[in-house]
Image (spheres, rainbow, N blue to C red):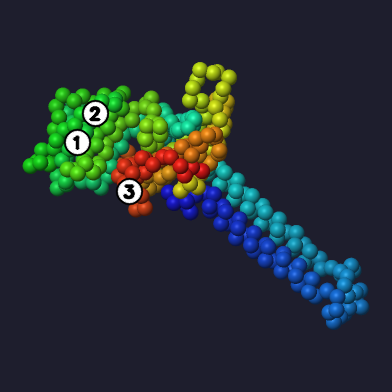
Amino acid sequence: MPAEDTVFNVLYDKFMFWSIIVGIFTFGWMFIAMLRYRDGVEPVENMEKYHIEVGSFPVDSHNTKLEVLFYVLPTIIVVWLTMMALASYTAVWKVPDDEPQFEIDVVGKQWFWEFHYTEQLTYEDVDTHIDVEWAGNMLMVHAHNTTATNVTVAIDGVETDYEMNASMGMLTLMGTMFDAELHSKITVFDAEDHLLHTWEHLPVGTILSTAGGEHMIIPCDVHNIMTLHSRPSDASNPAYVGVQHSFWLPEWGVKEDLVPGLEAGTVMYAQPDDIGTFPIRCAEYCGLDHSKMQGFVDVVAPEGETCEVDTGVKKSESASSQSDNTDGGGY
């Protein structure tokens, strides 16, 4: 979701446009009056009629229609901008009930982010010519006409490596039972260990953390409702409720504060329409290791669905190189 498409930037452009128009008119009229009635200027026509004296403003001259226009036109502009802002407020903070939603909790700690899944999410990379099918106790990986050679199956943190059948371009595993309540991930690599494809199932209760180099993962083309909390890393002291953070997605132009002690949390919405990996930053100084409050959000296509592919960020590159560089450069 490019930043120029966000509600904030649309409002900014409209307010800036009308501010410039009003400013040109206001300052233009002011400078005309200053130049016309400055000391040393030749008297204007009908000077005596309007009781005009050089160096002073006319006091007995007025134009009712012009004065009414000066009041009515700015009022219309202000009312229109206010209505537009209120409509945008509704669009940002209210999600229609009939539109798809995905809820996730974001927790800011000292000094890393945690992402708590309150809904399950199963996704698979698109446009890789690789397909994963896992039903019951049969797992199949189809990778025809690709350079795939190895498959890693991770179930609840336990990884097992397998080799593809080179002649058939596929892998079939019997007896590997799919459990919807376990965090499962299948990654496909080539002979040089380059990541080619990812399939992942995130059940309710999954917690991902930037402290372990993990990314926040959310689906595309739906309203993502993020509830934000600030909590201490060490809960041994009940009187300590954490520090102030600010969850910032700079490429999307959205930011929301995390308030310590606020049990209900704050809420932020985003509806990304591009697949890709985007940066997460903390926009509020939160202590000694504030610079470590970095991370990434992966926008993915839910299994069986597609969405537009962002050409600016490649997931495989950002996941392998950027996640290793989490020190310094904080905001």
Neighbour class for label 2 at 10 Å: few (<14), some, many (≥20)? few
Q: Nearer the viewer, residue 195 or 46?
A: 195
> Left or right of 256: which side holds 131?
left
Give the labeled residue for mark 2.
159
Task: Kindly give the residue lying farthest to the left in the view shown.
Answer: 167
**Image x and y of residue 55, in percent:** 87, 72
Q: In the displayed structure, would residue 142 be above or below residue 108?
A: below
Give the labeled residue for mark 1.
151
Which residue is rendered at x = 64% and y = 50% of the image? 82
Neighbour class for label 3 at 10 Å: few (<14), some, many (≥20)? some
- Label 1 sits on a secondary structure element that is strand
> For residue 175, what is the image quadrant?
top left
Label 3 to label 1: alpha-carbon separation: 21 Å
Q: What amino acid is labelled 1 in the image?
A: Val
Q: Nearer the viewer, residue 83 or 329?
A: 329
**Image x and y of residue 310, in percent:** 36, 50
Label count reads 3
Q: What amino acid is labelled 3 in the image?
A: Lys
The tag on residue 314 is 3
